[in-house]
Amino acid sequence: MSATAETTPGARTRQDCSAARNVTRSLLGYLALAGPFYVVVSLAQALTRHGFDLARDEWSLLALGRLGWIQQANLIATGVMIIVGAVGARRAIGRFADAGTWAPRLLAGYGLGLIGAGIFRADAADGFPPGTPGGRAAHVSGHAMLHLLFGSLGFACLITACLVIARSYHRRAGRGGAVASGVVGVVFAAGFAGIATGAASEAINLGFTAAVMVSSAWLTAVAVDLYRGTRAADGGRRALARPVPQPAIEMKGRRQR
């Protein structure tokens, strides 16, 4: 009897949906891991690389020198994980749900920006790697310009994604998620604006570093919320991935939903 039930169309549909949700959760796992992975690997290098000053030097300079390949791999791997996670976000949110189109695209754009920034390195500056003259490079190389271009595009995508997701939370009465996402977007925009000015200030550099860490934690929080939303799909709980409830419509004397 049970074997027969498992072969019915309804049972196959439930199995297919369950398998699809499992794939979505696996993809979201990469999005949850990406931020902490990038921060941990970067901090480990910043605290152990000879001549690197965490207060003075930007993390992008870690891609220079004999061990620079580690930070390049870190950027590229993080970007790939974010792109994979963006696919999971698209599946979890849904094509026609609020934020279902632009949030995944913007997250993927952020991932592409990190990959490009990992391929094209910044110029040596501020005495790092050891032996480099103090201050900024007198002339900006082609690969440094591409590094800045990819980084800027990626950061712009991240900031916009924060605001798009904040709006999505707000429409679902998720006040905490809306406020947190909006604050992260504003904080990261301010930190990036400070770095973009080129001002050699420890306060600006540390502020941007803090913004990177906060945004990385935010990515994990969003991925976890979407993950829970896939779990809640069977329980009827509301999450970011659930569609906006539609009002009942009167039709021929009956209430239709």
Image (cartoon, rainbow, N blue to C red):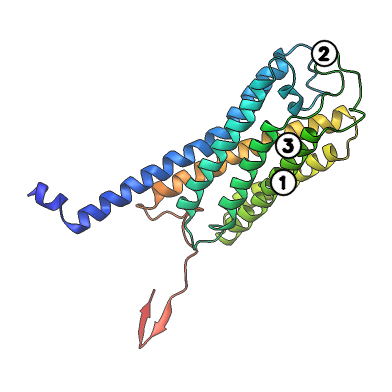
Please identify the quadrant where the C terminus is shown: bottom left
Residue at (16, 56) in percent of width and height: 8
Q: Label 3 neighbourhood size at 10 Å, few (<14), some (14-19), many (20+)?
A: many
Q: Is residue 73 above or below residue 162?
A: above
Q: Which residue does the numbered mark 2 point to in the structure image?
A: 130
Q: According to the image, label 1 marks what residue?
A: 153
Question: Residue 73 is drawn in which quadrant?
Answer: top right
CB contact under 8 Å: marks 2 and 3: no
Q: Amino acid at mark 1?
A: Leu
Label 3 sits on what residue type? Ala
Q: Nearer the viewer, residue 71 or 239?
A: 71
- Residue at x 53%, y 39% (from the top left corner): 31
Residue 111 vs residue 7, the one in the foreground: 111
- Total residue callouts: 3
Which structural element holds mark 2? loop
Which of discs 1 and 3 lies nearer the camera? The answer is 1
Q: Position of residue 30 (x, y in %)?
A: 50, 36
Q: Which residue is mark 3?
A: 211
Left or right of 89, for residue 70: right
